[in-house]
Image (cartoon, rainbow, N blue to C red):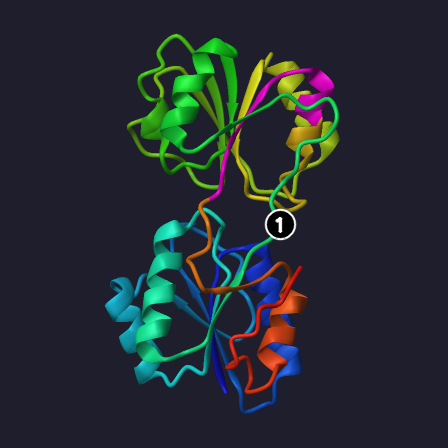
Amino acid sequence: MHVLVLGGTTEARRLAELLVAALPEDARVTSSLAGRVASPRLPPGEVRVGGFGGADGLAAWLRTHQVDALIDATHPFAGTISLNAAAAASAAHVPLLALRRPGWVPGRGDDWHPVGSLEEAARTLPALGRRVFLTTGRMGLAAFAGLDALWFLMRSVDAPEPPYPARMEVLLDRGPFTAEGERELIRRHRVDVLVTKDSGGAATAPKLAAAREAGIPVVVVRRPPVPEGVAVAGTPERALDWLRGPGGGRTGAQPSG
């Protein structure tokens, strides 16, 4: 058996660990990384870095390397690769599972403002605050570049490239983050509005609790939907269950959780 994991997330690394430990010794586990992070944490098993050349290129790779199952464990906002994965899996007749951590849910005391895109988030900001904690990553900063009246604290793993806001301080850091650390960032930089994507997961969730405690609004960019007809698992363990199902995941089972 050969399993290709489209990775780059904590869940993808965990899934690779589970697969390498659980599958027979002659099985192959290949994790594919986009290469957008300079020093990624490499998972066990085989690793390839770089794109495939769209859906057709991925379908050709699946056929050439005799892939038996494809698991899309990319970031919930990696919409293009997820669409390409669905098209490629269909063309190559390879079963596909999307591994997606559950999204965040607002709690009592939260002041959330859901939006559909980074552009909508930028349009929403001026009415909410003047000092922005921007945690949407280094891609897509052009959406905020015209907001000259606002100041931004932008956090990402790697340094951003322009265009980006003129008044911006960059904080290079990688999660997981602590509630105490997030509270201190908000206090020290006098942040009065937070912008985030609904990435889900525990590693970056403390900023939401810190924003609630500080009484500041949060602009939350909704995640794109999983391509229609693709099975979804909420945890690496459930993804392993899907793979172990009848036909090695080839029955199109729809795991929950």
Magenta part of the chain: 210-223
Residue 204 in magenta? no
Q: Disc 1 designates what residue? A: 102
Compared to residue 6, the image places residue 131 above or below, namely above
Task: Please identify the residue farthest to the bottom as the structure is shown.
Answer: 26
Asked if residue 150 lies left or right of residue 12, the reply is left
- Relative to the observer, which residue lies in front, 163 or 226? 226
Dot 1: element: loop
Tell which of 17 and 62 is nearer to you: 62
Residue 201 vs 117, above or below: the answer is below
* Left or right: 41 as drawn, with respect to 117: right
The residue at 41%/78% (across/down) is 94
Residue 34 visible here: no
Residue 24 as seen in the image, left or right of residue 251? right
Please name whichever residue, 29 or 117, is drawn nearer the observer in this view of the structure: 117
Callout 1 amino acid: Pro
Q: Residue 151's image quarter?
A: top left
